Image (tube, rainbow, N blue to C red):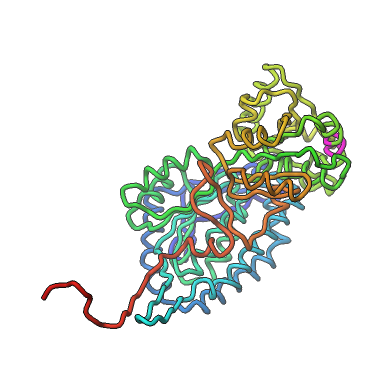
Amino acid sequence: MATEPVIVHAIINGEKANTPKQYPRENPTNPEEIVGYGPTNTREDAIRAIEAAAAAFPAWAATPIDERIARMERAIEKIRAAIPELAPLLSREHGKPLYDAQGEFFVTLAWMEYACKTAKDVLQDKVMDTADGKTIIAHDPLGVVSAITPWNYPLSLSSIKIAPALLAGNTMVLKPSPFAPLTVSKMVEIIAAEFPAGVLNMVHGDADVGVELTSNPLIAKIAFTGGTKTAKHIMKAAADTIKNMTLELGGNDAAVILSDFDVNDDRAMRRLVISNFLTAGQICMIAKRVYVHRSIYDKFVEKYIEAANKWIRVGDPFNPNVTIGPVNNPGQVKFVQGLIDDAQSRGAEVIKLGQVLDPDAFAKGYFMQPTLVLGADYNDRIVVEEQFGPTVPVLPFDDDEQAINLVNDSIYGLTSSVWGEEEHAIRVARRIQAGTTMINTAAVQGLDVRFPFGGVKQSGVGREYGAEGLLAYVDLHVINMPKVGELPNIPE
């Protein structure tokens, strides 16, 4: 499905910036095809964008919230109208199948609509009259927000920052990932056009741009989704000016299959397979390690392989029969394959899952056939590290206490899931250290934008989605009006 390359631009103060240097983005299905080009912006470009956002902030912060919401709602409708054009572009630059790309638009717009629907109520002043006087708790915008977003879900993980930040009265500079820069840039162009110049800016670029976006004194808040290692550098860069932060980071999310899980429940088993391999396993909240009670382990593996072989069909993202496309980039292929090879060298069994629909296309692109890893040690790299690709280890446990300890023995705590009889599953879930624990489902299948999302431990700081996702972009400003009187025990 080759077409003319798409060219996207930086947006600074309401205008597309002329950037002499560009970088290509290839099609992971066919790396010889260049899908488009993004600008390689400089540190100076980043400074201009930040200064434009700072200049636009006072007027935007003073804009009534009804107008902010109306502008965002117009952007939502224009994004919706552009889905037939933009969803195929996302598939081509990212590698996710078309149904998956369309699904990302669904999540993106669902959140933006929810944010618009609830912003006025969540962000309104809270006024309290007491016998001692009156207090107003106001929600003041922070200022300029820098948003740095990843490649795996570039639209939803940008909108999760753009919508609440702008609705709360902040301005923004956003930097997309170079591994999926095109569709998100088109979406940002649509949104920015509905807002005053300087309210929403976008730059691309390398580490020097990222450093500016995380250290510039005019930046009030950093909203970052990405790896824990990168987040540590961001926190250091932001330390001198004590910036507000929301960090959604890595995860090594566990699925616990209890002894009372029904292995003959085909629909549940299919949900579990999808929770491991949707988007080729490249989702922060995917289930990346599976612990199964030893009493049902053998039967579980048998039924899991059966379900996986039915659902997994690897191939061209535009083939309607395909459920899994290529991995996004060759570096990720190398990393995931390294984890598989390491486990295999230590005696683990690696089982290929599903069908490869087009072997010639498979050999040409960044494809990996999904694999199940059996017999790995609890401390093998494939178990303790985040794979972020189409492979998953399955390991046995003997009782609930051991399962809980295995799950919690990690530096991460983003999401998790427990599968089995509901009350039993809830008891186990309460003891798991994670920002979200789902019962009898996992990953995107259990995501609800009405409720907060984020991690504990080294999986992040703060929450996105829900009312908390809006409140993350304001400061509480308490205005006290006590009745005037003398306090006791104060000398003349």
For the point 50% across and 40% down, which residue is it?
228
Can residue 39 be seen in this snapshot? no
Give the main secondary structure, helix, strand or loop, of the magenta stretch: helix
Quarter occupied by residue 409: top right
Quarter occupied by residue 221: bottom left
Pick out the residue farthest to the left.
492
Residue 118 position in % (x across, y down): 58, 72
Q: Which residues are magenta?
A: 304-309
Residue 298 position in % (x across, y down): 83, 29
Residue 489 position in % (x across, y down): 18, 72
Residue placed most toward the observer, 125 or 229: 125
For the point 40% across and 53% down, which residue is it?
45
Residue placed most toward the observer, 36 or 274: 274
Is residue 400 shown in magenta? no
184 w.r.t. 120: above or below: above
Quarter occupied by residue 484: bottom left
Can residue 452 be seen in this snapshot? yes
Residue 425 position in % (x across, y down): 72, 46
Q: Quick one: quadrant of the C terminus?
A: bottom left
For the point 53% across and 46% down, which residue is it?
456
487 w.r.t. 187: above or below: below
